[in-house]
Image: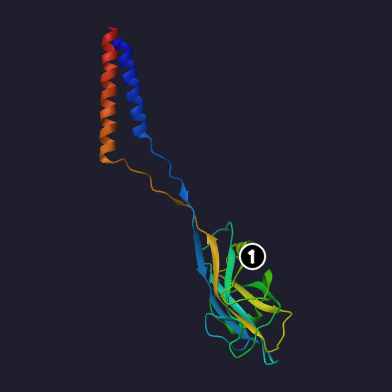
Amino acid sequence: MFLHKLMKMSGVLRGALAVCLFVPFMGTAAAQTTLNGLTHDSADGNHSHASAGTAEVGGFEGSEIVRGMSEFDISALTGPVASATLRFSVSALAGCCGQGPFSGTVEVVAYVGNNAANVSDFSAPATATLGTFSTAGATVGQVFNLDVTSALNAAIASSDVSFGVRLARSPESSANEALSFNNFQLVLPAAPIAAPTPVPTVSQWGLMILSALLALFAIGQMRRMRR
């Protein structure tokens, strides 16, 4: 009977020791990282319309074409990303100089930037077409999202330090109509952040040591009984 109880006690102690030694795996925490764009515009490639931070798209008084641009510093991106979303919003249903809004299509293309607001970005060669969207029924604050994963990864593979995007009315017109956009962002998945490994508390260490000592005592008693 005593041997049976001792063996049972030893089993319980071993179980307690195993529980104390068990450290739960916390997994990883995924997050997002956001790159803000350097936003500007260019009229006919020789001057700007809107203030810095705003991209005007459309025309002016039948004599100018206006395109909006934003450039992102990607020098810290050393490898392909799993996904990339271009996000921006409508800041005004008008241009900077009294133009009214237009209901039509805007085409978005990528180009190689230099992290500077240059009016010459108006005609920088397009490296990819990122998509189109309609301005019909647009409202101030409306957010647009475009998947730019492939184009961004191509820019990273080419060791580009800047990823430029350009918005233009399609088909373009110099009519006195324009919309303005701002808050250009690249939304990327951040690298997984490993959760810290839990460290046993003082009380847990004490229980672990006590369990180990009791287990050794029980084993010793069992060996004496076998003699």
**What is the secondary structure assignment of the residue under circle 1?**
helix
Q: Please tell me whether residue 57 is drawn above or below residue 192 in the rendered image.
A: below
Q: Is residue 129 visible?
A: no
Q: Tell me the quadrant of the picture where the N terminus can be found.
A: top left
Write the residue at 35% across / 21% down: 11
Taking the view exactly as shown, the residue that stands out farthest to the top is 227
Image x and y of residue 45, in percent: 64, 86
| Residue 39 seen in the current view | yes
Which x, y percent locates residue 205?
27, 36
> What scheme was used to colour the molecule?
rainbow
Q: In the image, residue 62 lies at what x, y percent?
A: 70, 92
For the image, the number of numbered tags is 1
Where, by quadrant of the figure, is residue 9 drawn?
top left
Q: Nearer the viewer, residue 93 or 95?
A: 93
Q: Quadrant of the C terminus?
A: top left
Q: Residues within 10 Å of mark 1 (few under 14, many from 20)?
A: some
The residue identified by callout 1 is 151
Q: Is residue 14 left or right of residue 106?
A: left
Is residue 219 placed above or below 83 in the rendered structure?
above
Q: Residue shown at 26%/31% (left/top)?
A: 209
Left or right relative to 226: residue 98:
right
